[in-house]
Image (cartoon, rainbow, N blue to C red):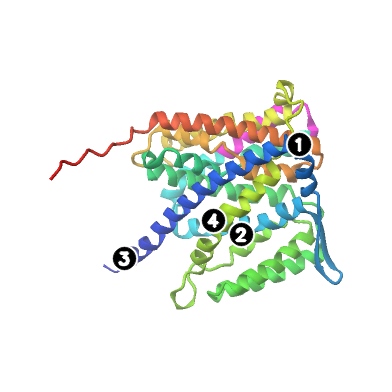
Amino acid sequence: MIARAIAKPVKEVIAPAMRDFLQQESAGGITLIVAAALALVIANSPFAASYFGLLDVPVVAGIGSGVIDKPLLLWINDGLMAVFFFLVGLEVKREALVGQLNSWNKASLPLMAAIGGMALPAAIYIGINMGTPENLGGWAIPAATDIAFALGILTLLGPRVPVALKALLLAIAVIDDIGAITIIALFYTAETNVNMLIGAAVTLAVLAMFGRGRVASSVPYVLLGVVLWVFVLKSGVHATLAGVAAAMCVPITGRGGEAPLERMEHALHPYVAFLVIPIFGFANAGVSLSGVGLDTLFSPLPLGIAAGLVIGKQLGIVGFAWAAVKAGFATLPAGVSWRQIHALSLLAAIGFTMSLFIGNLAFADPVQVDAVKIGVLSGSLVAAVAGYLMLRATLPEPVEAEPQAAS
């Protein structure tokens, strides 16, 4: 009786939160598609010089001697994206504690699928680029999944898509984000400034104290999160990781029964879905296609990314999921078929946001960065179209409402 009394309000809170998340991510994915397409059009129009010139405009902020001087593009990638990573951190914590990843039974299948979906794309990329060692730093680019894009494609199929399949895709994407965050921290960190790292550690400790004290107000987490971001930026560690670290300090339940994590997550979702991610997509998807031919598409860097996404994700997600189920480590969700899992693996191969982000960390050469964009865009486009068509073919036909008889 007590368990039911506790479970009912938790279900009433979590179910609407999951529904809102899926709706906002889906609509945000469509917005992202529009922003990326607009960037591509402008970058190949007479306004291209203005577009690239705007992204190079220097923006200076600071107080006294503490000044941050970066071009607009880096403010977007280092600053605005920290908000995105803060939201990712909130989602990861919620899923781990009360969501799709809070037990082995729930987490085993997406965990194994996500591991395969990260390992196989990276292996294919490395295999294709083995003869071009200057490209090997981009091995993690095809390992990423863009949940907004993927859910945006799912919305095109409406209520025919099983809720269990959406939840599985979300869980795989969350684990994928954890992997991407870990990769960025371990492999894409420049030389570190020890003093700044100490400042970051102290700030994070204070944030953790607020979290342990179950402080429900958003103010200390936001203000100290900004301070943490500055320290991490100056330390040499990628600044967006400050967003994840700050999010991990926000408590699920605050004093007085409030839910600060859920409140902050719900408040941030619209801004991230309809502002942060589309701005990032618009700023990073623009690439000149002048002179791009089959020789460009099939050169090692873009080919490794596209093949890693399209082929590696399918082999990794389906293969590892099948092996986990056959070995008894995991079970297939009720109402979900292996053909639908295969279609899901293609949607998970849409790596747009995180793939472009890692590409910007991996390479400084503009030629390589453009090659990354071509590989990510081509691979994601193929995956999106193929995933949509395959999923549409595997789902039941929509049921048409029968006309009501006149009374």
Q: Which residues lie in the magenta part?
A: 117-134
Q: Do the residues labelled 2 and 3 touch (CB within 8 Å)?
A: no
Amino acid at circle 3: Ala
Q: Mark 4 points at which residue?
A: 92
Q: Quick check: 154 left or right of 228?
A: left
The quarter of the displayed image where residue 378 is located:
top right
Secondary structure of residue under mark 2: helix
Q: Mark 1 points at which residue?
A: 46
Q: Residues within 10 Å of mark 1 (few under 14, many from 20)?
A: few
Position above or below: 383 against 52? above
Mark found first going from the N terminus, 2 or 3:
3
Q: Nearer the viewer, mark 2 or mark 3?
A: 2
Residue 181 image position (x, y, % from top left):
64, 51
Residue 112 image position (x, y, % from top left):
51, 41
Q: Any mark on residue 3, and which?
A: 3
Please, what is the dominant secondary structure of the magenta stretch? helix
Total numbered labels placed on residues in the image: 4
> Between marks 1 and 3, how big is the CA–CA gap?
64 Å
